[in-house]
């Protein structure tokens, strides 16, 4: 009986021990499962953190790229805006200069044509008067010459008009006597000028232009009668408008000057008007209000006087219109437009530079002194006389070269390119600031 009880206790102990062992196994197995699950979660979290870090870096790079694009776009757009606007100003400057330069060349030719029309009109009036009154050349004196030439000088913008008959050398003494008795036009002219108290002195005989009057650019001097002998005649200065304050200029033989002799020969040969070479006005001192123009460059426009109106009529005299070169460039440009430089050169080695600003023009210098930095914008033209042979090397052919100046270019330069560039840059900066504020808000 005892044994049986002992046996039962042993069985129970064995069962409890097996249960405990099983429970321990179950507990151990449960712990192992928890560790694995925890490890798995940790692994997933780490992977998630790695992905998040990668995404954050990608987002940062994307943002950086956007900002970089905005900065580059800002700089590029601003620079392009600046240069585009600046180029537009340069284009406007060059186009306007071209228009002004072409106008200068055109008007200069028109001015010359007006002078030719005036001098030809005087020639026709002289021929008409002599024919009507029955006077024989060279013994012709126009009445009211001061008044007639006053209007002509205004129309031609001329300061002096001269009439020189062609006097045969054999008729020299007869001509000298004629001029002594027909010189009242001088006193009459001085009265009209408001100079009644001026005594012009006696009229001399035919003589050469004074040697002192020939020290000027473009006017050569001859000391003998070789030049007068070319045509076999004298060309003494007779009537002038205005009348001289010193009568010793009357009967000065223009053909004693080589330049005028050559030009007169061309006029007689071609029967057309011509323009003399450029030079100073050697006889200005003989006239009131012309003394201050002694050093100004002048040219003479010559036109023949015909004996009658027949087609082959003899040439019996010459008219000279004296014109300073600055007249050719006045009242061309609008007020405030300038400065423009015109280099006037003739084929006889005369070169001067004129400055033009609005309606005004003046001699800048003798020689070519334009700014060579504007050579690429040069506009070249010529002053042509209809019928004149452009290939005739005995004549002086005129060329105009027109250039802009820094002063003119500065009139077209403004702060607009810089202002527009700053506005464009501000727009991009503002856009960038909006992105930054948005990025800060969402974070």
Image: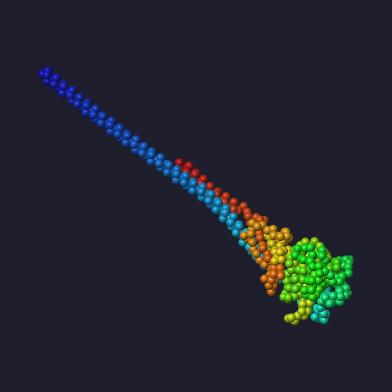
Left or right placement of residue 8 versus residue 69 in this view: left
Q: Quadrant of residue 279?
A: bottom right
At x 30%, y 32%, the residue is 35
Count of marks placed on residues: 0
Report the quarter where the C terminus lies.
top left
Q: Is residue 309 above or below residue 321?
A: below
Which sits in the foreground, 224 or 17? 224
Q: Position of residue 440 (x, y in %)?
A: 48, 42
The residue located at (57%, 50%) in the rendering is 422
Q: How is the image coloured?
A: rainbow
Quick one: which residue is furthest to the top in this view?
Answer: 2
Residue 369 visible in the shown view: yes
Residue at 80% x, 75% y is 233
**x and y percentages locating residue 209 in the rendered image:** 82, 68
- As drawn, is 127 to the left or to the right of 407? right
Front residue of 57 and 176: 176
User: Which residue is more in the foreground, 291 or 223?
Assistant: 223
Q: Residue at x 67, y 67 (%)?
A: 382
- Compared to 283, does 70 lie above or below? above
Residue 237: % across, % down: 82, 71
Position of the N terminus, as image quadrant, is top left
Viewer-proximal residue, 133 or 302? 302
Expressed as whole percent of the image width and height from the top left, the position of residue 428 reads: 52, 49
Q: Quadrant of residue 40?
A: top left
Residue 354 seen anywhere in this rendered image of the structure:
no
């Amino acid at each position: 009986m005892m044994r049986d009880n002992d046996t039962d206790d042993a069985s129970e102990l064995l069962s409890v021990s097996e249960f405990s062992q099983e429970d321990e196994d179950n507990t151990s197995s449960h712990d192992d499962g928890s560790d694995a699950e925890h490890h798995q979660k940790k692994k997933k979290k780490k992977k998630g953190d790695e992905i998040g870090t990668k995404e954050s870096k990608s987002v940062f790079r994307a943002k950086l790229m956007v900002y970089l694009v905005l900065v580059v776009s800002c700089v590029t757009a601003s620079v392009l805006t600046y240069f585009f606007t600046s180029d537009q100003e340069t284009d406007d400057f060059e186009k306007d200069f071209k228009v002004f330069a072409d106008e200068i060349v055109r008007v200069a030719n028109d001015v010359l044509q007006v002078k030719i029309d005036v001098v030809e009109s005087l020639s026709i009036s002289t021929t008409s008067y002599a024919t009507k009154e029955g006077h024989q050349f060279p013994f012709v004196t126009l009445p009211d010459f001061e008044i007639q030439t006053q209007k002509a000088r205004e129309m031609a913008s001329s300061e002096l008009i001269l009439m020189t008959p062609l006097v045969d050398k054999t008729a020299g003494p007869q001509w000298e006597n004629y001029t002594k008795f027909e010189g009242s036009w001088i006193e009459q002219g001085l009265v009209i000028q408001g100079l009644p108290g001026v005594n012009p002195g006696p009229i001399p005989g035919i003589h050469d232009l004074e040697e002192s009057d020939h020290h000027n650019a473009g006017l050569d001097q001859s000391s003998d009668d070789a030049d007068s002998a070319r045509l076999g005649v004298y060309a003494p200065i007779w009537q002038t408008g205005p009348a001289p304050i010193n009568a010793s200029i009357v009967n000065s033989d223009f053909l004693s000057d080589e330049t005028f002799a050559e030009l007169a020969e061309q006029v007689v040969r071609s029967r057309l008007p011509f323009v003399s070479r450029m030079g100073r006005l050697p006889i200005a001192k003989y006239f009131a209000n012309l003394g201050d123009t002694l050093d100004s460059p002048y040219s003479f426009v010559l036109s023949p006087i015909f004996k009658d109106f027949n087609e082959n009529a003899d040439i019996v005299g010459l008219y000279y219109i004296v014109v300073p070169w600055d007249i050719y460039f006045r009242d061309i440009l609008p007020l405030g437009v300038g400065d423009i430089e015109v280099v006037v050169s003739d084929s006889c080695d005369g070169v001067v530079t004129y400055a033009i600003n609005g309606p005004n023009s003046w001699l800048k210098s003798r020689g070519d002194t334009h700014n060579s930095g504007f050579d690429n914008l040069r506009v070249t033209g010529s002053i042509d006389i209809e019928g004149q042979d452009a290939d005739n090397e005995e004549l002086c052919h005129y060329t105009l070269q027109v250039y802009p100046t820094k002063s003119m270019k500065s009139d077209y330069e403004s702060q607009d390119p810089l202002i527009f560039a700053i506005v464009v840059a501000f727009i991009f900066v503002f856009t960038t600031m909006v992105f930054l504020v948005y990025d800060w808000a969402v974070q």
